[in-house]
Amino acid sequence: MKKVELLSPAGNFEKLKIALAYGADAVYGGVSHFSLRIRSGKEFDYDSFKEAIDYTHEKNKKIYVTINGFPFNNQIKLLSEHIQKMADMTPDAIIVSTPGVIKLAKDIAPDMPLHLSTQANVLNYLDAEVYHQMGVERIIAAREVSLKDLIKIKEHLPNLELEIFVHGSMCFAYSGRCLISSLQSGRVPNRGSCANDCRFDYTLYAQNPDNGTLMKIEQDEGGTHIMNAKDMNMSSHVDEILKSGVIDSLKIEGRTKSPYYAAVTARAYRMAIDDFYEDRYDAKKYEDELSTTKNRGFSDAYLVQRPHERNDTQNLETAMSEGSYEVSGLVLEDGIHFMCKYKTYPNVEIEMIVPENVCVKEVENELGRVYMREGKAYIEFYKIITNTDKVLESVHSGYMLPIKLPGTLPPFTIMRQKVLTPSTILIE
């Protein structure tokens, strides 16, 4: 049985390295030109993205370039130059959205594999066949498609690769087809600058046309988040997806999200995939881990049930809720220092998560100790000392000097502390 690919977002070079370290088989990203994440794309320029491609290939992993925007006529020349520059860097595929860009890419780089973006909203085998005949090797299916329909597409087109989103933000409309951001802020979703206006709180009014009376409709004092979709989380369905045998790649959304998100999502879905193939699948384990990330509430979206069958996919209360953990530190690539991301005090136990297939060596000295308990790694500092030997009583996010570790830890190890809510404080 061919093992499914795990595909993670690479919003910048650091997050690319983290995603690969925590188990991703492939990553996707790009520079800002013609990418549907302009803010994320600005994290890369041509030179750094070439370096990222080389780094990924050195790890024997794959990287796909996002050129999935919708160009205007006056951008075609720039787009052509951009496709050529990217193709010369030898990524593993280019992600595109429109028939015209497919033809252009085939003319410029005929040997470059093409993946069709979810922006094309492929829902059936008729559309899939047209794109496949144009030279597309993989289709990233619409988020609104069902697993049953994907099975039908694979039956008709067995040589076409299918990729689906399994985790991340959901669009209020068909992916990228919403105009709210364009109307309210001039930021065009299908050109990569969506302002996520659907997440905002709104105040609704009802007007009596007979007397002009205007009445405010309230859900609470903040108005309502009537268009705010919950985040997709398909971790409890990975076994069902893989049993179907038709999916080639599981994709995680989130190029603009945090390094912690990149690590935990890759880690959780890596565990889910590997556990499935080793016959030890445990959905609750992956769900618990993913709940540590910030989210808008979770839904299993539309892969198993049709949209009209769902009434629990909207978060009407808030645009973003806290995860159950706060990131307190990230170990640097040298393995002997970390950067504080929250707050760190002496004599406080801090849990750690580590990259895939690496071991943590237990150690204790004047700086602190690293130890294992019940299969989890922990660190406790006795002293907080910077790389310049300055002693601190504590360290908080924003402090720019690296902090010494008691021992060598795997690069990109993440330190995290449970968020204490009033209820957890009472329980503890």
Image (cartoon, rainbow, N blue to C red):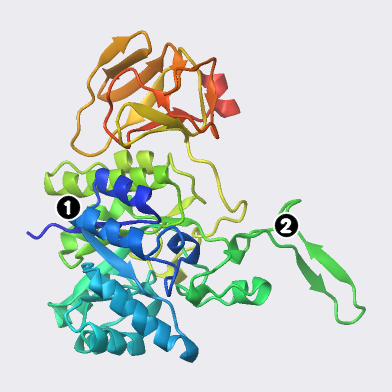
Check whether the beta carbons of the residues at disc 1 and disc 2 lie within 8 A of each other.
no
**Residue type at mark 2?**
Gly
Judging depth in this view, the residue of 390 and 321 nearest the camera is 390
* In the depicted structure, whether residue 34 falls above or below residue 382: below
Residue 1 spot, x, y in % from top left: 7, 59
Q: Earlier in the sequence, mark 1 or mark 2?
A: 1
Circle number at residue 58 = 1
Q: Which SS class for mark 1? A: helix
Horizontal arrangement in the rendering, residue 340 relative to residue 221 (left or right): left
Horizontal arrangement in the rendering, residue 6 relative to residue 330 (left or right): left
In the figure, residue 106 lies in which quadrant? Answer: bottom left
Q: Which residue is mark 2?
A: 223
Residue 202 can be seen, yes or no: yes
Q: Residue sitting at 29 percent across and 54 percent down?
A: 237
Q: Residue sitting at 34 percent across and 72 percent down?
A: 145
Judging depth in this view, the residue of 83 and 346 nearest the camera is 83
Residue 157 spot, x, y in % from top left: 16, 81
Q: Which SS class for mark 2? A: loop
Judging depth in this view, the residue of 378 and 274 nearest the camera is 378
Please rate how many residues cluster around mark 2, counting C-alpha atoms within 10 Å: few if below 14, some from 14 to 19, many from 20. Answer: some
* In the depicted structure, whether residue 334 falls above or below residue 426: below
Residue 7 spot, x, y in % from top left: 27, 58
Q: Residue sitting at 54 percent across and 68 percent down?
A: 194
In the figure, residue 125 lies in which quadrant? Answer: bottom left
